[in-house]
Image (spheres, coloured by chain):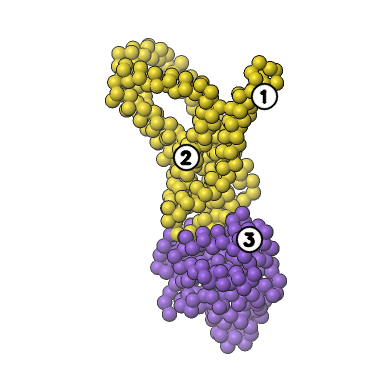
Amino acid sequence: MVKKLFKYEFSAMLKKLLPLFVIVLGTAFLNRIIQFFERDSTTYNILFVSSVVLLVISCVVLLVGTLWISVSRYYKNMFTNEGYLTLSLPVTADQHITTKCVTALACGILSFLVCLFGGMIATSNGIFSEIVKAGWWLLRKFTKTFGAGRTISYSLEVILLLLLSAVKTILVLYACVSLGQLGKRNRNRPAKAVGFFFIYYFAVQVLATAGLIVIAVLDLSGKLEALAEWINLHPHTAANLFLWIGIVWSAGFCILYYWISRHVLTKKLNLE
Amino acid sequence: MSELVRCEKLTKIYDRTVALDHIDLTVENGKIVGLLGPNGSGKTTLIKLLTGLLTPDEGAVLVDGNAPGPETKKVVAYLPDRNFLNTYMKVGEIVQYFEDFYEDFKPERAYRMLEELGIEKDVQLKTLSKGNKEKVALILTMSRDAKLYVLDEPIAGVDPATRDYIIRTIISNYQPEASVLISTHLISDVESVLDEVIFIQNGTILLQKTVDEIREEKGMSVDAMFREVFRW
């Protein structure tokens, strides 16, 4: 069943994303073609800058659009009339949330790769090979300084942290959409979901500010200095520790947001 | 006859409104049961609880011995009271969708009925008329060899000819050992096919009898009985 869910999720997402992929790659090709023309004219400069701006805008639209399409699909598929079919399938709420989240993540990665490929096309006049050379030099330098084992472990930890952060972003939006469905009145459910997101965002900012105030009031400068000294003495342990704190922190919030969506779908479902 | 549906003290409360109040109910195999009641009586809430779209606040509901979940969804064919299909899909795609997810779905039966109506599989659902969309939804539901068919207001808001088509489709496609639960206000249209009726009002069951019992005991049709019970 999960395989079939993935099949329909991917086909529905890609149907909407393909035109955006074409736009990004099209503007990248356009930019590259413009570069073949005479470079010392005002017309060239205007066309070149415009095509770069167009490429940047289309990449932003693709990345934001991917997230938007993923979240709106979750809402439409689960909580509107379509939910009557989706939630009548012999599938668990866990399978629904997981397939939607994994598909959204995979499509996000795909969109990122398309943007990267677009950038490659636009910079294939020699700049791209310079960027690759610089990246390769940095990697070699990093490996030489920290060793191959540490380079691999840092890379894996950073990738894991990035993936968990992306999943956390998707799941917090799913949780807000799910919470927006609560209450007796069925009206303005998308507005309620947006409201929940802003409440969440505001709460996060308030907590972060409160944390900074606590540090300032308690005068922890001495302890912070000690911490900085410890980091200087044990840079690898500190880097690993901070990366793992980030990983556990993100994983914890992923579980919380997943649980909220699951709870609404299994215990508080109230379709329009 | 074995028991297919059992509700015990089934209760659903929306905020402070009691939609279903400690309902006890059983439906046996092989019956066509009319779930009859005025608007807001709790028919759709009961159906949503049976299909697992709602969870009860108190009591329990069992379908084929299981609480609503993936196992019961395998054996319950549900037709909601609204268009629940993705209208951007083509008819053939939605048939494939049902075939993919429901093991008991019979695509050849669906295509036969669609062909009878002249609906091509390459047609997008959104281009069909409201009546044809409803017919497609019914065809998909009745193309399953389910144990329980739950049809929420299947003949509401359609012309008499379409009503006849819908009733004919239900009768000629459900499995004899299965049960059909039809919620409706239009009793005279379905009365001839019902084995049993359940009258529901304000979230409580007023009456559950066979159509023959009503005729023999009260000497009146189900329609006349409904009008008497629910008279303002």
Q: What numbered label is drawn on residue A155?
A: none
> Is there a contact, CB below 8 Å, between mark 1 and mark 2?
no
Task: State left or right for residue A54 relative to residue A250.
Answer: right
Q: Amino acid at mark 1?
A: Leu
Task: State left or right for residue B197 relative to residue A248.
Answer: right
- What residue would you read off at disc 3? B123
Between tags 3 and 1, which lies in front? 1
Image location of residue A107, percent across then percent down: 50, 40
Q: Earlier in the sequence, mark 1 or mark 2?
A: 1
Image location of residue A121, percent across then percent down: 54, 29
Chain B tint in image = purple
Determine whether the residue tagged by mark 1 lies in a helix, strand or loop.
Answer: helix
Specify whether disc 3 shares its chain with disc 2: no
Q: CA distance from mark 3 to mark 1?
A: 43 Å
- What residue would you read off at disc 2? A105
Q: Residues within 10 Å of mark 1 (few under 14, many from 20)?
A: some
Q: Is residue A52 above or below residue B7?
A: above
Depth check, front residue: B139 or A234? B139
Determine whether the residue tagged by mark 2 lies in a helix, strand or loop.
Answer: helix
Q: Which residue is painted at 54% across and 49% down in the image? A: A12
Q: In which quadrant is the N terminus of chain B drawn?
A: bottom left
Chain A tint in image = yellow
Q: Which residue is painted at 49% across and 23% down in the image? A: A128
Q: Given the image, what chain letter belongs to the residue carrying mark 1? A: A
Q: Amino acid at mark 3?
A: Val
Determine whether the residue tagged by mark 3 lies in a helix, strand or loop.
Answer: loop
Can I make out residue A50 in this image? yes
Depth check, front residue: B217 or A194? A194
Q: Is residue A137 above or below residue B186?
A: above
Q: Which residue is painted at 54% across and 63% down in the image? A: B95
- What residue would you read off at disc 1? A47
